[in-house]
Image (tube, rainbow, N blue to C red):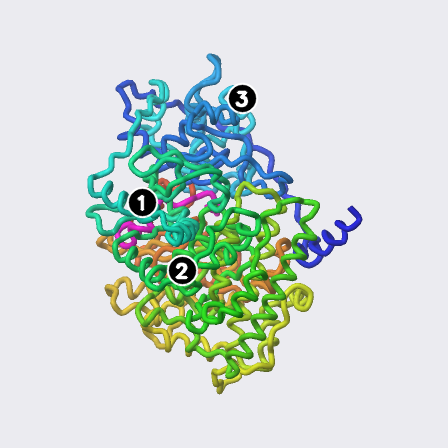
Amino acid sequence: MRMFRPCMYFVSLFFLLPACQINNTLFSSIAPAPTPIALPAPAENPVSYAEEIRPILEKKCVTCHSCYDAPCQLNLEGAEGLLRGAFRESIYGGARTEAMQPTRLGFDEQTISGWRERGFYSVLHAENKQSEALISSMISLAKQFPFPANSKLPDSIELGISRKNQCASSEKFTDYAHEYPLSGMPFAVTGLSDQEYSLLAGWVKQGAVIPDEPVILTSDEKKVIEEWEMFFNQNENRNKLVARWLFEHLFVASLYFPELEGAPRFFEILRSSTPSGTDIEPIVTVNPNDDPMGPFFYRLRPITGSIVHKRRIPYPLHQEKQQRINALFFNKPWPMGNLPGYSYTERANPFVTFVDIPAYARYQFMLDDAEYFVRTFIHGPVCRGQIATDVIRDHFWTLFQDPESDLFVTNTAYQREAIPLLAMPGQNDNLLKMGKNWLHYLKRHNDYQALRQNQYVSQQPQGASLAHIWDGAGKNKNALLTIFRHHNSASVVGGLVGDIPQTLWLMDYPLLERTYYELVVNFDVFGNVAHQLLTRLYFDVIRNGSEHNFMRLMPAGQREAILHDWYQDLGKLKFGIVYERIDDESPSAEIFTTENPKQELAHRILARFQSVNTMPSDPLNRCQNSNCSRPDEPQWVQSADAALSNLAARPAAGLSGIKQLPEVTFIRVTNEKNERTVYSLLRDRAHSNVAFILGEELRYQPEKDQLTIYPGITGSYPNFIFDVPVAQIGEFVTLLGNAEKMEHFEYIVETWGIRRTHPQFWEILHDFTAWQSERQPLIAGIFDINRYENF
């Protein structure tokens, strides 16, 4: 114990600081409930779950009740979650000392009785004769006390993902209704219509029958599934090793078969104790690289239920992909030892596990679909990304090192020396050993950074150049990505979007693979505080490594000064103590002629990689002339572009309205023909540094905040929506830009805002999904409103 305290002090001092100021939240007293209104009569005609109830749940319930962050774990994406019911324990209990038992639908229990034994309780059936089904009581409470149209909600209603969910049962509902009369369902939003209420109440009264609806696969689907399962389950050891690597990299994907006709159906890959052609019996492990404890087969299972935006990560399986896998992994012979196991070392270090597979094949496979892999750890799949997001900037560009210039790929001797240093923490979640565990892995990481630096100085004496950056062979647009952080969520889009950011990442194979394993394969959303803290701390040094890689392109003698701008104030303390010291002496192969080398290099990147940049000009955010609009769009859209571009890439010091905006604002612009276009207005919060877990508000630099105008949709969790006629877009932009005070912003909200209580709230929210479905059907889905603001 005497040894533990200094280690924990070290962790708190250099990773948790500054945490000295934590404000207490004061809750307003609950106002008396108004007189309840009469309820519509429950439907008496037979009500169909599939045709009448499922659409209501998708429209007005799934927006909050989906994925792991569904309140009270009431997941309404499909029938299984509705039948399972609710649970009082939150998955996101980051401070828990013990890992919780996983509660994954489709895996951890196969029967409703099994979930009842776990503590889940029904929302469809009353617990006793004196009570009603919870879902009936909840929708009745909301229907009796509706909010005035487009009104601001009372302060007594707590919103946001940090709100304490009460998770009342039907037996305790009377007490809940007395204490929280304005907290029926749908929660704090425009409620059910009379018809929707009548159908839902009638269905529950009729017994809440959910008929079995087995997934019927077409003959073409059965054929292609059989082909892919045969491909994944070949018997030769090389095939088994590659199949394991592929499984660990695709297990979170929404797989689809683009060669089949019609709307795509999505599938997941899992391990089953049963072979192809038989019913799937999942091998249940916490992580995909845990020991299956027996023989298994890779199987493809249909993903059922509603499609929600926040967990849709599509990945295509087609003949071209199979040919690409064969070309990368099997065209050239490579020596193969014994198949690896599932020991601590093999789970903590994938470079040990898959050392026999050529590094080029692994890296190039990931580069081919880099946006997918970055989306897995930036976008999801745990649906609340605080572990990943509080270590990154609000806006940055990501580039990748060319495999031919990656020494880990090309230099076998260096690779052998580096592999033991690339193990990642998080497997051991012992609280008492957390500090010692972290220092062990930190030393390995810094030893690797020093080794890497020496190798690159030796092997590339002229320094790094843009020729060392992967250009997607001139056609693959996965080469350039932009990442946006939205506080506790994030999104990734193709191309270099927005103004030139403060920081840029350059990822090589060890960085990309470690990020994927640390945040996806080895991350356990049900883990305890030690596991989650170690994961967060290691991702911090991964980010720093990506920045160091980019710094090799900067001129010698200026790198340290640039990094100090990225790590201001207390962030500087971590250099020399936590982060490996930057190499500020070896040359860069790039020649600079201005006093702002980062800006100069960014413009050079934009020019050099135009062919693989999905937004090579981005006129809304990087306008170079008076016509700040997309030339291929209709004239009315161009006028909206030009108006909104006046908000982009300007610091808050000269655009006061920024400080009133949340992280993600959706804007719908319509013309007189009821045609519409949409934008995402992204607030990029400036920080003095992102080197610490707590005290983020102490590191804000609000006068430096900027807005990025994204023409389309990015982000799964809109914080607010504006609906603006194109004839009024100029006035909207002017007023928003000058909204110095909250009352100025409230006028904008009253005029164009779509509050939670707006009569057309649901129609307009789901129109954004419809708009994306028309243009990007593979990633379109229902948006989450748990973060929707109360302006």
Local packing at callout 1 (Cα closer than 10 Å; few below 14, some 14-19, many 20+) is some
Q: Would you say 746 lies left or right of 450 here?
A: left
Local packing at callout 3 (Cα closer than 10 Å; few below 14, some 14-19, many 20+) is few
| Coordinates of residue 701 in the picture (x, y in percent) | 58, 63
The residue identified by callout 3 is 172
- Labels 3, 2: front one: 2
141 vs 60, nearest the viewer: 60
Q: In the structure shown, which secondary structural element does the residue marked by tag 3 occupy?
A: loop
Circle 1/circle 3 CB separation < 8 Å: no
Q: Earlier in the sequence, mark 2 or mark 1?
A: 1
Image point (62%, 61%), residue name: 444
Image point (54%, 26%), residue name: 176
> Which residue occupies the extreme top position in the image?
129
Q: Would you say 12 lies left or right of 288 here?
A: right
Q: Which mark is residue 229?
A: 1
| Coordinates of residue 360 in the picture (x, y in percent) | 41, 65
How far separated are the C-alphas under marks 3 and 2? Answer: 51 Å
How far separated are the C-alphas under marks 2 and 1? Answer: 21 Å
Q: Which mark is residue 291?
A: none
Question: Does residue 61 appear anywhere in the picture?
Answer: no
Q: In the structure shown, which secondary structural element does the residue marked by tag 1 occupy?
A: helix
Query: Which amino acid, mark 3?
Result: Lys
Q: Which mark is residue 366?
A: 2
Asked if the stretch drawn in magenta spans residue 180, the answer is no
How far separated are the C-alphas under marks 1 and 3? Answer: 49 Å
Magenta stretch bounds: 771-791
Q: In the structure shown, which secondary structural element does the residue marked by tag 2 occupy?
A: helix
